[in-house]
Image (cartoon, rainbow, N blue to C red):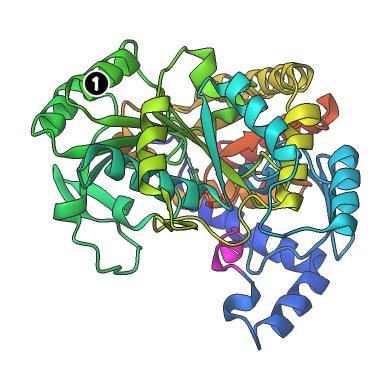
Amino acid sequence: MSPEHGVAPGRVDALLEAEIARFEQTHPRSGRTNERARATMPRGVPLHWMANWPTPYPVCLAEASGATLTDVDGNTYADFCLGDTGAMFGHANPVVAEAVAEQVRRGSTTMLPTEDAVVVGEELARRFGLPYWQLATSATDANRFAIRIARIATGREKVLVFNGKYHGSVDETQVSLRNGRMMPQPGVAPNAVDWARTTKVVEFNDVPALERALADEDVACVLAEPVMTNVGVVPAEAGYHDALRDLTRRTGTLLIIDETHTISTGPGGYTRAHGLDPDLFVLGKSIAGGIPAAVYGMTTDVAEAFLRYTAKDDYRISHGGFGGTLVGNALTLRALRTTLGEVMTDDAYRHMGALAEQFDTGVAQVIADHRLPWHVTRLGARVEYLFSARAPHNGGEAKQFRVPRLEAAIHLYLLNRGVLLTPFHNMALMCPATSESDVDLHTGVFADCVKELVP
Ligand SMILES: Cc1ncc(COP(=O)(O)O)c(C=O)c1O
């Protein structure tokens, strides 16, 4: 038995082999579809990440509704992946579906605002506390634009990120720390960015390292998730956010909080739940019920810089170097207004939080029953397990706690029994349509899987 994560590698390999065979037997049509699609798309998928599941080929979706997926072979799944947060408020929500269908019939994209923009702006300001807002089509873009605006506002170039972060495919952030030195992030294609000029990276929760990195006063912004979520969950330690805000203020550095995942915490995200006070705020993925959209908010000071740079002169608005043709169109605004107003409600969060607690308790019990050196963390509606006895202090440590083959074996075992976790790590999300029986199904199958791994 491995001393680190409590499971013998031989058991993991045997389980993987058996589960791949089982998958192929029960997913023949998905296999044929993928085979055919390979003729026109690399790996037979429209986005290469869709081949990132532990399956020999991806499950081909037939339909998604509420918290349930059905594939083309007729298999159904309790969906805890929820589009890796994109569908955190459930699939095919009837209220959003109706509003979106109606808006498509009335026109989707015109380069004009609609009255929905007023309601969306007011609701974002009320919910997240920042006065001014703009839209983007993805959280990646919102982060890019927020960084750009931070540069405009400060006259500085660098962005500081935390080791192990993910903020989308934002070129300047694709770095990591190795032996204390900044390196290109492994697995990321070269992008001609001169990182020494554009970027600094430090470990999360390390106040002295942050202080040293900001001391030169050459960093435009710190871009941070309030709790790291893309390497497993790395909680912010007591006092860290106060130190982060204090150091950024003292050095004239802007703070961008990216809540794209941590919106699981509550209706106002981690920011409202913990009284954070960022200069810019980014949120994407789930907020328009599946229609591509993201928002970024800013303080009055930052908005002044934004307005200066995008000034209107001789009947022309300066392009500013950011934005996009489909951004903030009528369809997106209607989807946003409906999702914010009628789906991301306090009641929905109460339901999601209670189920996440049930999920968390179930996993913790299985871990305790087998005395495994694993732990489970809950962030509102999100639950994540990791193969270490305690939560990591930072991204570097979290990476060491990942065991890709073990993760793949568990995910595949669950998938073959109708439970879907996100393919990227052991993350489970609850949506308003998730039921107690969905959670019980996961707990039971997870317990059986662990019994196979640790007899
Ligand atoms: C914290 C965070 N920010 C931004 C993004 C980028 O989102 P998108 O891929 O929708 O652009 C992600 C994606 O996982 C994320 O986790």
Q: Where is 318 relative to 122, above or below?
A: below
Q: Is the residue indicated by label 1 positioned so its CB lies within 8 Å of ligand 1?
A: no
Quadrant of the frame with the N terminus: top left
Magenta stretch bounds:
47-54
- Find residue 54 and report its image quarter: bottom right
On screen, residue 99 versus residue 55, left or right, reads right
Q: Nearer the viewer, residue 218 or 235?
A: 218
* Residue 198 on image: x %, y %: 21, 52
Residue toward you, 136 or 159: 136
Q: Could you say which is closer to the camera, residue 87 or residue 321? A: 321
Q: Residues within 10 Å of mark 1 (few under 14, many from 20)?
A: few
Q: Secondary structure at mark 1?
A: helix
Residue 276: image quadrant is top left
Reading the image, the residue beneath label 1 is 249
Which residue is at 47% across, 28% downward?
A: 374
Residue shown at 71% from the left, 29% from the top: 443
Q: Is residue 375 left or right of residue 327?
A: left
Identified by mark 1, the residue type is Arg
Q: Is residue 106 above or below residue 371?
A: below
Membership of 50 in magenta stretch: yes
Query: x and y percent of residue 250 in the render?
Result: 18, 19
Return the x and y of residue 271 as percentages of the image width and height. Answer: 49, 20
